[in-house]
Amino acid sequence: MIKGNVEGVRDSILAELGNIYDMSVEKGRLVSPEIVALISDVTRLINREISVSIDRKGRILEVAIGDSNSVELPILDLSNKKLSGVKVIHTHPSGYSKLSMIDISALLKLKLDAILAVGVGETDITGVNIGYCKVQNQELTYEELENLPLEKAINVDYLEKVQEIETELRKNDVVEDESEYAILVGVDSDESLDELEELAKACEVNVSGRILQRIKRIDNVFYIGSGKVRELAILRQIKNANLIIFDEELSGVQIKNLEAVTGCKVIDRTILILEIFARRARTREARIQVELAQLKYRSQRLIGLGSIMSRTGGGIGTKGPGEKKLEIDRRRIKDDIHALRQELEKIKKIRALQRTKRESSGIPRVSLVGYTNVGKSTLRNLLVDLYPSDNTVKKEAVFAENMLFATLDATTRTMVLPDKRIAALTDTVGFVRKLPHDLVEAFKSTLEEVVFSDLLVHLVDASSDTVVEQIKSVENVLSELGAGDKPTILALNKCDVATEEQISKLKELYSGMEIVEISAKNEVNIDILMEKVIEHLPRTMKKVEFLIPYSESSVNAYLHRNAIIEEESYEADGTKFIATISDEVYNRYNKFIVQEF
C-alpha cells in the first residue's frame, strides 16, 4: 500500500510504486540502484517526493508519496540509547539534494539510522546527500555528506557509522537540543534587523548571524539574489542554524525555493509576529483574532509552503490553529475564517454593549496607545494603583514585562481623576513597524476602544534611537483605524534615562502636540500627565448647591470622594455644599440639589 498524498496519482503509477515492496536491499548498503531508479522516474512523472523506509535487514517497510515527514514511525526516547533501526531514502524533485529542515527534523526526532536525499533533475540524478545522527557536546545533532555521486552513495556501508553513533549514545547522557538558532535576513536597515532580533528573542529564538543586502528590485524566485542565497546557505552551515528569518513578507513560492537551496526552514517577519501573538494570547477573543490572521495569511500561500507545514518540524509557525497540510483546500480554510469572524462578531456586540453603558454613564474614555514595549502596561498599572475607583481597588494588574507584545488583550479599568471625575482607562496592544495588515484587521474589534476614546495618550520610549520611526508606525496604524484625528497627548516615557538631546529633538519635531515627559517605572511627572489628561477630556461637570439632611450623612462622605467641594457649611436643616459634580453624581443625588449655577 502506498501511503501519503496519493490524491490525483494514477492507479498504474501507484501499482508501479507498489513493486518496491517486492524488492530488497543488500545488508549493510543504504539502497539499491533499482529502487533509486524507480522512485526517480516516478518523481519526474508526478513532480512529488517519494520516500522509502528500509530496516537494517534490507526489508522495505513503507513507501509513501511525500517528503520524509510522511514516514510513520514512532518517536524514540533517547533513554533507549539506540537508533530506530530504519533508514529513509527519498527524492527531491527540485533537483537540490541538500537535506531540508524537514529531513533533518525527521532524522533527529525519529532517530533514523540514516536519511538519504536524491536530487532528481529533468533527465538524470543531480546528486545524493546523506544525513546521520551525531553526538556532540552531550547533544544529539547531525552531520551531512553532500553531493555524492549515486554510485558512491549506493555502496556506502552505513552500519559501521550506526554502531559508532549507538556506542556514543550508550556512553553519554545525551539530550536533544530543540532550540532554534536563526540567521536574520533584511533589505531595509540595521535598525529594522535589530527589531527583528528582538522579535526573535520574544519567541525564544537564538540569533546566530545576520545578512543585510540592499536590493533595487525584488527577486521573484528568492526575494534576494541567487548569489546572496548561496552565501546565506554557507553562513547557515557555518553557524549551524536551523532557521532563517526574513525581515520582509515572502510568497509561498519564495519560501519553498529558499528552503530547497538552504536546506533550512524559512519564515518571514509576518509569521514571526503571528507566532508571538499566538504564544501571548490569553483570552478567547485574542486567540480567535490570532487564528483568524494566521488562516488568512496561510490561505494566500497554500501552494509552496514547506517546512512551516512540517509535522515533525515544530518551532515557529506551528502555534495557534495548528498544522495546515498543503492538501487542505481553500474552501475549508474559508469556512474556518467565516466561523471565526462570526465568533468575533458576537464578542464585538458584547463590547459594543459595554461601551454603550459607559457612554450612558458619561464616563470619559482614555486609551493608552504606542509602540510595543514602551511601557503602556506599566503606566496603566501605575495609574489604576494611584487613582483607584471603588470597584478597581482589588483588580489584578495586567502583565507588564520588558518584551515585545507583552499585552495582547485590551483591558479597561476605571480610575478617579484628581478633579474627582471617574474615567475609563484602556490599555491596548502595542504596534510595530510592518505590522501585518491581516493582524490589524483581525484585532480591529479590540482596537475599536481606541476609535471610541475621548483622548489618546501616545506613549513613546524617548530613549530609543528609533523613536521617530516608532511614532510614525503608530500614527499609520491609528490612521488605518480611523483614529488619526483624536485628541492626543504625547507622553515621553523613560525621560530619566533619555538624554537632553533626545528629549529636545522630540519636542522640536512634535512642537504642535501636547507633550509631557514622564517615567512610568519611577513615577516621574505622573501628576503633570494627569493634569493634561483632565485639561483635554470633555467636561460634562455641573456646579450645584446641595443641602444634605443630617440623617443622610453617608451622602456627605460620597460627595467628598466623588465631587470637587468648593464650599461646605452647616445649616439648621443640614450640610450645605457648593460642588462641581459629574453626571453620575447629579443623577444619583439630584433630589438634594437646591440650586444649579
Image: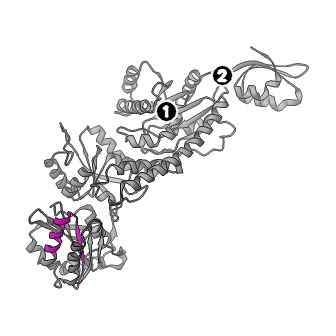
Taking depth in this image into account, of 123 and 183 the one nearest to the observer is 123
Reply yes or no: does residue 100 show up in magenta. Answer: no
Query: Of label 1 and label 2, which has the lower sequence position?
Result: 1
Q: Are marks 1 and 2 in contact (CB under 8 Å)?
A: no
Q: Name the residue under label 1.
A: 519
| Identity of the residue furthest to the top in this view | 597
Q: Name the residue under label 2.
A: 540
Give the magenta range. Answer: 35-56
Q: Which amino acid does label 2 sit on?
A: Thr
Across and down, in percent, residue 390 comes to 69, 38
Asked if residue 40 is positioned above or below residue 26 in the image, the reply reads: above
**Which residue is found at the position 66% from the left and 31% from the top?**
360
Across and down, in percent, residue 401 comes to 47, 45
**Which residue is found at the position 56% from the left and 37% from the top?**
382
Across and down, in percent, residue 501 comes to 36, 25
| Badge 1: residue crowd in 10 Å (few <14, some 14–19, many ≥20) | many
Q: In which quarter of the image is residue 568?
A: top right
Asked if residue 243 is positioned above or below residue 168 in the image, the reply reads: above
Q: Considering the image in quadrants, where does the N terminus appear?
A: bottom left
**Which residue is found at the position 49% from the left and 37% from the top?**
447
Taking depth in this image into account, of 585 and 461 the one nearest to the observer is 585
Q: In this view, does 549 lie to the left or right of 15?
A: right
Give SS at disc 2: loop
